[in-house]
Amino acid sequence: MKSDKYFVRDIPRRKFLEMSVKGGLLVAATPALLSQLVSCSQSGPVTDPLTIDKATLDRVIAKALEKGGNFAEVYLENRHSRNIVMEESSFKSGLYGISQGAGVRVISGNKTGYAYTDEITEESLMRAAEVASYVATAGISTPPVNVSESSRNSFITVGRPLDEIADSARIEVIERADQAAMGYDPRIKMAMIDYYDEVRSRVIANSEGIYLRDELPLLFFIVQTMGEEGGARHLSRERLSRHSGFEMFDEVTPEEVARNAAREAVDMLGAEDAPAGMMDIVMQNGWGGVLVHEAVGHPLEADNIAKGVGAFTGKVGQKVASDLFTMVDDGSIPNARGTINYDDEGTQARRNVLIENGVLKGYMTDILSARQLGMERTGNGRRESFRYMPIPRMTNTFIENGDSNPADILSSTGKGLYVQSLSGGSVNPVTGVFNFTCREAYLIENGKKTRPVKGATLIGSCLDVISNVDAVGNDLAFGPGICGKGQSAEVDAGQPTLRIRGINVGGSRG
Amino acid sequence: MNYKDLTEKLVKRCLKFGADEAEVYLQVSRNLSVNILNGEIETIQEASSHGVGFRLFVDGKMGFSHCNDFSNSSLDETIKRAVAFAKLTTPDPNNVLPSDRSVSGISDLFDPDIKSVSMEEKIRMATLVETLAMKDPRVTKSSGSGFGESEREIFIANSHGLSKSYKSSSCSLGVSVVAEKGDQKNTGGEYCSRRFISDLLNPEEIAAAASRKAWEMLDPRMVNTQRAAVIFDPDVGRSLFGGVISAINGERVLQGASFLKEMMDKSFASPLLTIIDDGTRAKGLASSPFDGEGVPTQRRILVEKGVLKSFIHNTSSASRAGTVSTGNASRGGFSQLPGIGTHNLSLEPGKMSRNEIIANTSRGLLLKGVTGYGINPVNGNFSGGASGFWIERGEIAYPVKGLTIAGSAESILNGIDMMGNDIDQNLSFAAPTLRVAEMQIGGR
């Protein structure tokens, strides 16, 4: 069964907690104990699960293709994660997790068989291979090539490896953020801080003969603050995330993240009801790029195109957006949250221009959709974990810089809505109809940002909105998010400040 | 393997390794899914898994760990880590485990027949529902159909002598299609989930609903921005009440992050609104004999005639609030600590038929689809994208798309002036058609 809706959020709290518990071993620990737990796991019966030899992988791949099929793949994964949560200035929980498992996939024509196992042994891999081969049709057969070490470029550098960071340093970061948030203003009544880090090790081996192994570190730091005054309440949010080492917090301090969150909570307390109806929108640079992630990015993922149902089906080479509009997905931006070195099928990540000066250039593919469409692999085949098959996903998706000065864009907009940040939204990839909820927005009156408004929703169709972009700034910036499409993926969305003429805004004031 | 014995034995292991109190939550599950596209198998996925979580207290301090390797050495190792962790956390007097040994009697949560139906038959059902949904000439493409099933057995034991288990199953059948006309595209999807495979709606019914949802929204129009009545279809009830349910979560109330925190025993909604949470309904998709930490589930009135009657609690939030658990500990699996959530939610149906509600509306929106987060549980704002049908002079006039609706929880919930009698109790969120007298609708 297919979900009709894809969504992205800046941080769905429940989902975020789930990210740390993808099966395998999870240990809740006070941060002070985490290093002790790591060493205790080393002394225990746990061995490196990903060292299964290449000859075994060859046997599993051969088994998977025994009944026929064009492609088989083994994916092994091991994930160490730490998640520490502070609420109401107390440490609420600390989790330490080790999750491991393997998935075997067989593609036969347009059919895919998939089975996964929590155990990484030859016996369980062979069993998974047999289950996955259920879809294979005799007659369709591509003989496997024995796997051998392959090489790919890396875009992730690590200054301070997460495994070498004392847990007291993680605690300190959280406490510093809490103090900065609570000290910002007496109207800040509560702060909630989520700290998450993980190191994901993966092995990808397939019937085309590749064998790849690497480690991806990931940090995600979220500060939410609740402002309250009179009867008004606002829960604000600020996020920081990269594929990098702990040096992330040297470059952007926890205090900076916390103060940004607290500022929003206080500023929005005076918000009045948002107006309703069609209006011009100025979208501040950064996370606002999530609008095109949803409205344009998902419809450009090649799985729906291969089915012939996507909104952009058959439109390559056609003018689909304003001349000012260039959109890129780039999984090779150094250390960004959406950066992946190579995708979870082993295809090198790269910069893919999707729309250039309004003309549609291409789609984002995985192995299956690239083959179905007769297109190149673009490095977008991603998976949440070994429990999921890879599917076409975005990485770091953004609107390219234009040449307008952001201040001029605002001052030349007589009346409208200034959207400073969005919570997230969803799109129907077939019809291209999207919706977004504004977390922080202001009225524009006489070219100036004036009063804050609450409860504004933006809706529309993707083709209309990208045709109505009439000013693009030169201040490209990014924001981190979690994208959901039946499985989650870490992404960045970005844009310069820009103006869209005539978007339908939902508010409670007529 | 005798999991009940294992679960009880593991509680003793926890105590032996230094816990004062301990809870063991063990889960065994099996899943299968078949997806069909254009009459061919698109994907088949299958997996079995198991795992166990340990929540334990040492001097009032909590530790939690879990693993999915059931060898004695790994289980012992995992317990030791939780004990070591507990010794280092801050004590909390609300770290308590339940001791009620009773269970709520609920029939028919497990269907042994799901597993015995052959793979070929499951493929046939999914293929058929797609074929039927494509029959209407206005429907031009399929987005796929599918059959899914899962079986799950839960074992909970704790050091207060509580030891319980239950087995459950579910299965689902659904399809999503596209209707096209000129440049227009519209999707329609329908799926049915049940505990028992023999209770699934027949493929004809599912296919017809998906097909109709796809074509009935073709040729939509736009209306002017205005205030008008909004009739909520049963499918979109959750969007309206999801935020209310979040706002009565006992922990969020204690943290002050709820627009209903001061409203206990006060009226905050129309007298037509009664909301019931029931964890005990036979065959209910969200029924279970006990909640995520072993407390018997209940049938509980949360809102009665517009008056807030109950917050929902697990054992820990109840302790902090000075009350008792309402049997609402949720659990996202063996790897997670208990949270707070509801079971089968339903609104008490009213007296009017759906047609009467429409006939009594001179001008307004019959809301079929809503996007966005619904009512914000912190401040009560509601704003979302809307689609459905425009109503003029008591009749459905034409489809509308790309609208917005907005308001405050107070004005929307008090504005409910008609409650329908059409309720499908098979759903874990069951609402009838209902009308809000006036909302802000954003259009042209």
Image (tube, grey):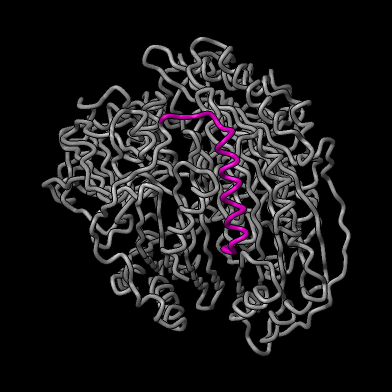
Residue A277 appears at what percent x and percent y? 43, 30
Using residue A300 as the reference point, say whether residue B398 is left or right of it.
left
Identify the residue at image location x=40%, y=21%.
A273
Give the overall secondary structure of the magenta segment: helix
Residue B222 appears at what percent x and percent y? 39, 41
Q: Quadrant of residue A202?
A: bottom right
Q: Is residue B145 at least partly visible in the picture?
A: yes
Q: Quadrant of the C terminus of chain A?
A: top left
Using residue A439 as the reference point, say whether residue B307 is left or right of it.
left
Q: Is residue A325 at least partly visible in the picture?
A: no
In this view, the residue in front, A316 or B120, is: B120
Identify the residue at image location x=47%, y=53%.
B12
Identify the residue at image location x=65%, y=29%.
A498
Total label count?
0
User: In the displayed image of the protein, which residue is found farthest to the left?
Assistant: B351
In this view, the residue in front, A260 or A297, is: A260
Position above or below: A219 against B34? above
Residue A459 appears at what percent x and percent y? 48, 39
Which residue range is magenta in the image?
A: B70-93
In this view, the residue in front, A194 or B370, is: A194
Using residue A344 as the reference point, say whether residue B319 is left or right of it.
left
